[in-house]
Amino acid sequence: MKTFDVVVVGGGLIGSAIAFELAGQKLRVALLDRQQPGREASWAAAGMLSPGPDSPAGLALVPLGKESLRLYPDFVSAIEEASGKTVAFTHQGTLEIFDGPDGSARRDRLLARHAELGLPAELISGESARSIESALNPGVDAIAWLPGEAVVDPRILVDATLAAATNRGVEIRASCAATAVLGKADRCTGVIVGGQKIASEHVVIAAGSFCGSVDGDSVPNAIRVSRYAPTQPIRGQMIAMRSSKVKLKRVLRSEHGYIVPRTDGRIIAGSTLENAGFVKDTTATGLQSILDAAIALAPSLAGAEILETWAGLRPGTPDHLPIVGPTDIRGLLVATGHYRNGILLAPVTAKLIREWMVDGKTTFSAERFSPLRFSETSRGASAKTGTALS
């Protein structure tokens, strides 16, 4: 039976960033994924790094998003150095578009809210916006300029992060589904994979929408993971296109959709929000809504070539906030439920898990995201409970 200091369950960007971070502490780390690592929500994402709230529930997430965006340049540098790969990270800002007769009023509310939250945002005229993005719809004039936002290509980043983790000594196992987390006397002891135990003092659940598959209902001494990580899939359909008439440098976004440039000239358009279970099909209605929103932002995209369509499953949670931190089972930590913000929040999530595990405390307050908020057996327990290595 092989033994590790840490087993990370889930090989998307969150899980691979955690594995990379922990391996930097000279820990023996295994990263397990039910399929090819990085090919679920991370592979499907657009890669916008936007800490601004997209709903009232998102207000609680802003400080965490701001901290993660602050960490991003150093995170990318560390990944590039350890992997030997270049990550497509650009810091060009975003143009937020507001259509309709009340567009100016909605723009002004966004500017005021961003000012209150300490997020950079500026009023920009339609003429000025089109001088930097000529494809922008000439009929739109209510626009906000968000200079602090950035973009990364998630597919490039997750592959580089997996390579970086491997180079730090992480043992990555593809097509290796953990079906249970084992516990004894309120302590985590490892995981079950293919009917066999992998012993580990710590287990980090980073399985996105698939946390329920690790519950181990028929396994003796299994910990019910969904008690701490009640995630559910929210489907998002996406389109990649290319147009000789549109040379996009920055994100264009409205309440209806967005278009995101890639360094190779592709333009990514999205997205839908659908409760479709674990079905990852694309639909005519979903793709049409994305195309309508994209063409409204940049009319020249009407003649664009469609290169690829796909759908991903975002891990949603009951309160629409991520689940990050230690549980009341010593050694069991959770890092999931990032919904639409997994790419943005990867650096800060990896840092928090490393601090909880190694130091037993964090330098950033994250109690709001504790997995204990969902556990009926842990009422009154504190999310500050450390799980530091002894």
Image (cartoon, rainbow, N blue to C red):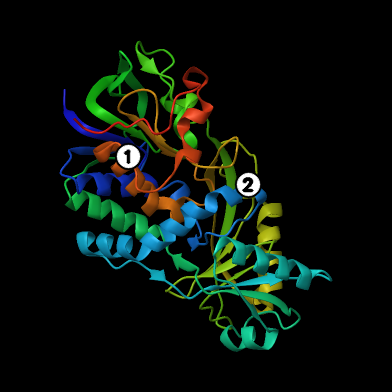
Query: Which of the labelled discs sits on residue 361, or is there none?
Result: 1
- The residue located at (60%, 67%) in the rendering is 115
Q: Is residue 89 left or right of residue 77?
A: right
- Please state which of residues 346 and 250 is positioned toward the viewer in this rendering: 346
- Identified by mark 2, the residue type is Ala
Q: Position of residue 177 (x, y in %)?
A: 35, 31
Q: Is residue 224 left or right of residue 201?
A: right
Query: Which of the labelled discs sits on residue 19, or is there none?
Result: none
Q: Position of residue 142 (x, y in %)?
A: 73, 76
Q: Is residue 281 visible?
A: no
Q: Is residue 196 left or right of residue 115?
A: left
- The residue located at (43%, 61%) in the rendering is 69
- The residue located at (37%, 68%) in the rendering is 88
Q: Residue 353 falls in which quadrant of the image?
A: top left
- Identified by mark 1, the residue type is Lys
Q: Is residue 355 left or right of residue 293?
A: left
| Within-10-Å neighbours for mark 1: few <14, some 14–19, many 20+ | some
Instruction: Check the picture and name the quadrant holding the C terminus.
Output: top left
Whichever of callouts 2 and 1 sits on the residue coming sooner in the sequence is 2
- Please state which of residues 78 and 380 is positioned toward the viewer in this rendering: 380
In three-dimensional space, the C-alpha distance between marks 2 and 1, rounded to whole angstroms, equals 26 Å
Task: Name the secondary structure under disc 2.
Answer: helix
Q: Is residue 71 above or below residue 203?
A: below
Q: Position of residue 85 (x, y in %)?
A: 26, 65
Task: Name the secondary structure under disc 1.
Answer: loop
Instruction: Check the picture and name the quadrant holding the N terminus.
Output: top left
Residue that carries the numbered disc 2 in the rendered image: 57
| Within-10-Å neighbours for mark 2: few <14, some 14–19, many 20+ | few
- Please state which of residues 352 and 305 is positioned toward the viewer in this rendering: 352
Q: Is residue 322 above or below residue 58?
A: above
Q: Position of residue 309 (x, y in %)?
A: 55, 57
- The residue located at (40%, 28%) in the rendering is 327
